[in-house]
Image (cartoon, grey):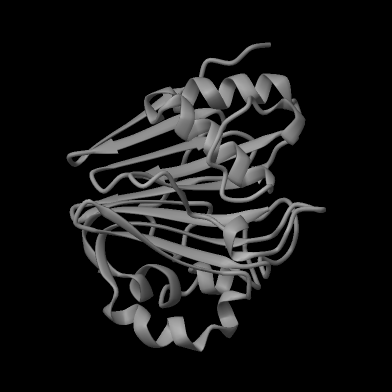
Amino acid sequence: MCRHLGWLGEPRSLAGLMLEPPHGLLVQSYAPRRQRHGTMNADGWGAGFFDGPVPRRWRSPAPLWGDASFASVAPVLVSHCVVAAVRSATVGMPIEASATAPFTDGTWLLSHNGVVNRAVLPDAVGAESVCDSAMLAAVIFDRGMESLGSVVAEIGAADRDARLNIVAADGSRLLATTWGDTLSMLHGSDGVVLASEPYDDDPRWVDIPDRHLVDAHDGDVRVTALETAR
């Protein structure tokens, strides 16, 4: 339903992460290579990055390929921690900036790639939109990021058709889940990137198995299986 990425490492420009790679989010907005659901991601885009401890965001309901203003400043927007996404809206969900990832609680940035039945979501305050992804983000923020894996498993058990790939970061830690969609990782000497699909053909990309949690912090990356209810 979307394509997203998270970066944690040496400072990089948003252009270098999103626009310049040969198969980056810009290209994934109109020609994704591994997307299983939908063919384009033209219902908005968002980029979140950290300026010290403060998360900053730039979001739009328009296609990424048509945003000349962002393209002009993205080369000078530099951060050590980034969460970005291009959106293919779930049928019936609003197309507006507030429905576009990344979402935030003021500390974390979070993107959801997938779909979930809003009826199974526990009550949570602070959702930025009535769309499924924003409401899911509010539930995760309410429970706390240490509970990310258990929340995803709980909601996945309640909605067997849910796809719950999450990427989240707080400036010093990068978390991700796989639940029903693709995620790949490139871990180099300068940092780690987690993405719905590789943004280039570097042979070091590895695919994360389904129903796993990725936790990157202080140069260390752990990948663990999510406990699931059968």
* Residue 162 x/y as whole percent: 71, 34
Total tally of numbered discs in the picture: 0
Q: Residue at 46% x, 44% y: name it.
A: 167
Residue 161 in view here:
no
Quadrant position of the C terminus in the picture: top right
Whether residue 60 is situated above or below residue 33 in the rendered picture: below
Image quarter of residue 122: top right
* Residue 144 x/y as whole percent: 41, 27
Whether residue 46 is situated above or below residue 8 in the rendered picture: below
Q: Residue at 48% x, 68% y: name it.
A: 24
Instruction: Tell me if 120 is positioned left or right of 123 in this view.
Output: right
Task: From the viewer's side, name the closer residue of 77 and 165.
Answer: 77
Whether residue 120 is situated above or below residue 229 in the rendered picture: below
Residue 169 in view here:
yes
Which residue is situated farthest in the right direction here?
Answer: 92
Q: Residue at 75% x, 25% y: name it.
A: 160
* Residue 96 x/y as whole percent: 65, 64
